[in-house]
Amino acid sequence: MKEELQKRMVKTPDGQEFEIEPLRDYYCEAPPTVQTPAYTAIVEKIFNWARSESIWILGFGTGCGAIEMRPLMTPRFDAYRYGVQWRPTPRQSNLFIISGYLSVKTLKRVIRSYEQMQSPKYVIGLGSCTINGGMYWDSYNTIKRLDDYLPVDLYITGCMPRPEALLAGFVDLKKIIRAGKAEGANIYAENFDWYKANQKKVILDWDMPEYNW
Amino acid sequence: MKALYSRLQNRCTLGEFTRQRDNLAFITVDRDQLCPLLAHLRDTEGFLHLVLLTAVDWIEQEQFQLTYLLCNREKQQDLGLRVLLPRENTSMDSIHDLWPTAATYQRELREMFGIDFPGSPRVNDEFILEGWNNIPPYRREFDTLKYAEETYRDRPGRITLDPAQHMRDQLYPSKKIGGN
């Protein structure tokens, strides 16, 4: 385990000494729980409409597909007119686009970022690599099936898909959210042990908390 | 380049000379000749830029080949120096004191080929493989496909088509040219 995650004594500038245990002190120990709809169906429907109209994407590019997101931000494709925008922190975003091949090293960071996002949260797998490995099907270092490690709401096929395909994907995701079927965060909470077992099978140096909230 | 080769030959014994283009050549050198030669090329001959440091795994000859590619920006010349090393417990002198950037290449070679560079900064730190517990993946005895099949789960339904045949079937479905 990394040094900064180990239990240790620290000294404050004014001379106090106390013990910190980063994994317990900085992170939530409890696993995620399933969030059932809190209101009547009609109110939830309004909520879902509002959620679908404010898709905020985490600015995290994993593979070559990240390059397709740049033109979407600019006037040519202008995704902002669909209520889609990019945010710099997982705490402010609710959509994670896994944009292309995902190496094991990146997967670790992806899991950390995904778990820090607030529910309801959605995942789009962009490109063939997230579906079955794509051209990296025989690589020692990239995962083949994204849905083994994170709950995926929608896949966009192609290698690489064009920005138009992503825009169509946003429209489809909106339909899924409005229908109340984008339950990724709940699926993750329900099958938390299964996801963790899969993640730990490929991430060989697991030096982070069980749940990164 | 030939002139440069004969100039260098006066200084030390050189191996095989391969001319690729007018401004690109490769020279094989002995292991202990390399560091003084690199220093000479950098300080006297104007090869200021280390373009890359990479390795080739000649498994049949049980050798690793290290290639140091240098560039002389003024004369627009590239010179590659090849060093052949035995494949078992390979270690090589570090050149991070000549080019600090070499430390990154050496760290990568340490991780991907298992070639040691004693004294190079952070050479034993993980570079991109975190917690790797297998043989270094760029060594040719490492079976990438087998490892991928054992480690990552396949999604059923993946098929492989021969691109030429597939495009013929797509574009000219009536003409059955070759196969099928």
Image (tube, grey):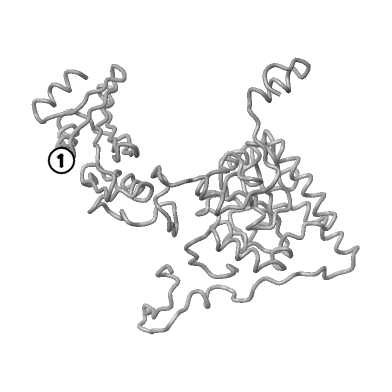
Relative horizontal placement of residue A105, taking residue A190 as reference (left or right): left
| x 60%, y 65%: residue | A197
Vertical placement of residue B64 versus A144, above or below: above
Q: Position of residue A164 (x, y in %)?
A: 71, 35
| x 57%, y 45%: residue | A101
Relative horizontal placement of residue A102, taking residue A15 as reference (left or right): right
As rendered, which of B163 and B47 lies closer to the eye? Answer: B163
Crowding at dot 1, Cα within 10 Å, few <14 / some 14-19 / many 20+, comes out as few
Q: Which residue is mark 1?
A: B32
Q: Position of residue B10 (x, y in %)?
A: 8, 25
Q: Position of residue A16 (x, y in %)?
A: 38, 84
Q: Amino acid at mark 1?
A: Asp
Q: Residue furthest left?
A: B10
- The image quarter containing residue A9 is bottom left
Q: Position of residue A209 (x, y in %)?
A: 54, 70
| x 23%, y 47%: residue | B94
Q: Secondary structure at mark 1?
A: helix
Relative horizontal placement of residue B140, taking residue A122 as reference (left or right): left
Vertical placement of residue A124 versus A20, above or below: above
| x 66%, y 46%: residue | A131
- The image quarter containing residue B20 is top left
As rendered, which of A80 and A21 lies closer to the eye? Answer: A21
**Quadrant for the N terminus of chain B in the image:** top left
Relative horizontal placement of residue A109, taking residue A131 as reference (left or right): left
**Quadrant for the C terminus of chain B in the image:** top right
Vertical placement of residue A93 versus A127, above or below: below
